[in-house]
Amino acid sequence: MKLIYIAGPYRTSTEYGVKCNIYQAEQAALFVWRHGGAAICPHKNTAFFGGACPDEVWLEGDLEIMRRCDGVYALEEWEQSKGAYKEVAEARRLGLPVFFRLTHEGLLMEFLEK
């Protein structure tokens, strides 16, 4: 079973926006699980922990978790997220496959089946 890291925006200007970002990540994680993979969804791992530690703690921790995965599934607007941008860049540096939601879901499904 392949382990897929969900990368996408978390922080936003409102709590409602954070909740919406978490929901999008949940849907992506469910897609991975339904297609034979195991999903790591950092949005759920530290949901609403903001302020408990400096942001860099979460960002560095998430990078470490992502490094242990087989691939990355990047959500819409990942480029606007400081954390997701770093995660995708690190995945590419490591040679991990990166799949983009909506444009690469078919490729992700093939990857999970191998």
Image: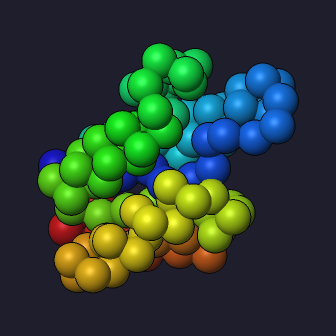
Residue 19 in view of the camera? yes
Q: Is residue 87 above or below residue 94?
A: above
Q: Is residue 58 above or below residue 9?
A: above
Q: Is residue 62 above or below residue 66?
A: above
Q: In this view, does 61 lie to the left or right of 48?
A: left
Q: In this view, does 108 lie above or below 39?
A: below
Q: Which residue is drawn at 83% across and 30% down?
A: 14
Q: Which of 87 and 97 is in front in this view?
A: 87
Q: Which residue is drawn at 82% across and 37% down?
A: 13
Residue 77: quarter of image: bottom right
Percent of width and height locating residue 38: 28, 42
Q: Residue at x 54, y 46 (%)?
A: 28
Percent of width and height locating residue 114: 19, 68
Q: Which residue is at the far front?
A: 54
Q: In this view, does 11 lie to the left or right of 50?
A: right
Residue 53: quarter of image: top left
Q: Which of 97 and 111 is in front in this view?
A: 97
Number of numbered callouts drawn: 0
Residue 3 in view of the camera? no
Q: In this view, does 70 lie to the left or right of 39?
A: left
Percent of width and height locating residue 82: 57, 59
Percent of width and height locating residue 112: 29, 61
Q: Residue at x 40, y 38 (%)?
A: 58
